[in-house]
Image: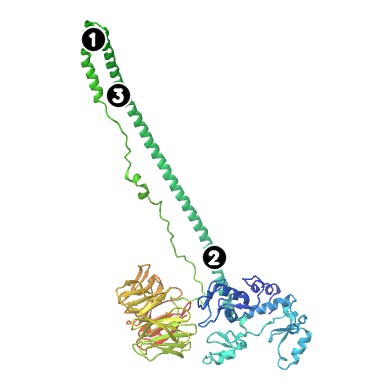
Amino acid sequence: MAIAQDKTDNFDDLLTCTICLETYKGPKYLPCLHTFCKTCINTYILSTVNKGKTGTTFKCPICRQDVLMGESPGNPETWAEKLPGNHFVASMMDRQEIRKSEKMCDSCKVNNKSEKARSLCTVCEEAFCSSCETYHKSFKISAKHPIISLEDVGTNKETVIVSSLIFCEEHSGEIIKAYCVDHSKPICTLCATLSHRKCDDVITIEKAVSGIKKSQKAMEMSAELKDTSKQLSDLIRDRKKHLTDFEKEVHAILTKVSTIKDNIIEHLNKIEGQIKDEIIKSKKETVLKLSEESTKLESLKRTVDNWIAIYNTCLHHGSELQCLLEMNRINENKEKFGDAFNKGICGIKNMSMHLESNDIVENFAKRVPIIGKVKLVETKTSCPKLSLGKKINFHTGNINVIKCIDLNAESVFLSGLFMKDEFIFTNSQSNEVLKFSHNGDILAKLKLSGKPFDIDLINGTKAAVSSSSNTISIINTQDMTLCRSFATTYPVHGFCHVNGEFILASSPTLTWINATTGVQIEQATTIGDNFLLYAKNRSDYICADGSNTVSRTVNNTKVFSYTNEKLSNARGISVDYDENFYICAHTSGNIHQITKDGKLIRIIPAESIGIKQPWVIRFKKNSNQFFVTCYQTGKIVVCEII
């Protein structure tokens, strides 16, 4: 069925490089599927990768995901060349050129001629003019190549494939000819004979693509992508609304701070006015009293001064009789004057004014150093979880066994990792780290000096292994070689690697150490039995907290403790992508599934998946698959919840 013209022609955005904003030239794509011109991504890599240091990754310019260039990436100048070409984009570019009648004959270009192309060979991916098409059909090697009309491609009169040659990403120049169903991966002949020779289900690429556009899987994928896009749109809208609300909260707080300041100033002005009025009133009353005292004393002084003037005049100019009479008069008034003087003098007091301020006022800056504290409160939202796969009900889903790997060992500390297409397991009985294919075939072994206990991933190619000799060994998971080892000086059984640190578990102690130097950072204690643990980050972890209890601790606070009489000797702990916890009960022979807040969902008997004493459980990232190891029998059972 042909696709409508107006829909197929509207793909200009797909053909535009987001770096140079022009049509792609040599389109290369990253694992995140973002595509760039070969020259553009090369310039970006060279500008962002630190040339002074050896690195193996760079970040996508758009989504900032790490792009791993392998264990031996070589010079960053060669990285762009190693990236796979985007054949779909190249095909769409050809279609665009054809639609715009701009496609020129590729054979003529070689001879420095310019002829408009009329047809296209879908095998050779070359456009031909009428003459070159005739020559192309005349050669035995290309006589049967499908030739399509560019006019049909441009008008979409029929369903045509502009480019039918897709090259292998692992083997340059090799064409995709088969499809490995086991790995869900298109492969070339070399892939089929080298890395996929043991795969059970390898089919031709023609069979794999037959009816793919109308298949149920294609429809489900389209629906899932649209649903995910809608969820992301809802989340973006929610985030933008939250940003607006947050800005309003900040504005409200700033307004409140200003209001508090204004209220404080208003109150200070008010009490300042009150104290000033009191001071002025006290001053007025005191000044009046002091003035009256001075007036009385001045009156007494004038009386005395008058007596002095009269008496001196009598002495110099009066008769003896006049002097006698004035002396008698003064003596007669002296007693009355003395009473008035004593009365006036006794009531005199020195006046002074003091301000007795309270302690809050005297030390206002110290007593009121701040208006308040600004706190950022993080609250978990109820945003939906995004999933590009089949929606699984982890609470009620059935558990199916996919495969069983038997190490034929007894009483073995057996831990492991999910890799991309392989498994890595520790075997304490043989002192080995083992690498298996997805089918359970042994691929490689690494012998260690001590008994390996637990293993955790550091990055895409390196893992750390704890051992009985209190040693952490760093290994390369690609070629299974030992990179380095260092003694922890702290007891260690199980551990987790989080943000450059190891959290070591050895009952009843948890120890945080630097993953590079081994220097202790922090320690905590439990009630006991904490052999293994799961950590979301350095301050959010769950481990055994007694013989039949596990506790989750967040920021040094226990958020829950789960206790069950059927939970005996908790060991391995893992989490699915819905944040449900799974706890291996070693002695009681079951697996406890609990919610993220410690509520029991169900108890899974170990015998139901073919083991006796579950030791370690690990979920594959963003998947419904997990494996459980058995301490008693050395079996590893890979399961899925459906």
* Three-letter amino acid code of the residue under disc 1: Glu
Q: Secondary structure at mark 1?
A: helix
- Report the quarter where the N terminus lies: bottom right
* Crowd tier of the residue under label 3, counting other residues whose Cα lies within 10 Å: few below 14, some 14–19, many 20 or above: some
Q: Residue at x 62, y 79 (%)?
A: 86
State the image coordinates of residue 111 (x, y, percent, origin top left). Answer: 75, 84
Instruction: Find out whether the residues at labels 1 and 2 contact each other: C-beta distance under 8 Å.
Output: no
The part of the image, by quadrant, that contains residue 117 is bottom right
Q: How many marks?
A: 3
Q: Earlier in the sequence, mark 2 or mark 3?
A: 2
The part of the image, by quadrant, that contains residue 525 is bottom left
State the image coordinates of residue 269 (x, y, percent, origin top left). Answer: 41, 40
* Three-letter amino acid code of the residue under disc 2: Ile
State the image coordinates of residue 608 (x, y, percent, origin top left). Answer: 39, 84
The residue singled out by tag 1 in the image is: 326
For discs 1 and 2, the disc positioned in front in the rendered view? 1
- Front position in the image: 424 or 328: 328
Q: Earlier in the sequence, mark 1 or mark 2?
A: 2
Q: Which mark is residue 236?
A: 2
Residue 388 visible? The answer is no
Residue 602 placement, left or right of 337: right
Q: Secondary structure at mark 2?
A: helix
C-alpha gap between disc 1 and disc 2: 114 Å
C-alpha gap between disc 2 and disc 3: 85 Å
Instruction: Find out whether the residues at labels 3 and 1 contact each other: C-beta distance under 8 Å.
Output: no
Q: Secondary structure at mark 3?
A: helix
* Crowd tier of the residue under label 2, counting other residues whose Cα lies within 10 Å: few below 14, some 14–19, many 20 or above: few
The residue singled out by tag 3 in the image is: 293
State the image coordinates of residue 253 (x, y, percent, origin top left). Answer: 46, 53
C-alpha gap between disc 3 and disc 1: 29 Å
Question: Is 232 above or below relative to 76?
Answer: above
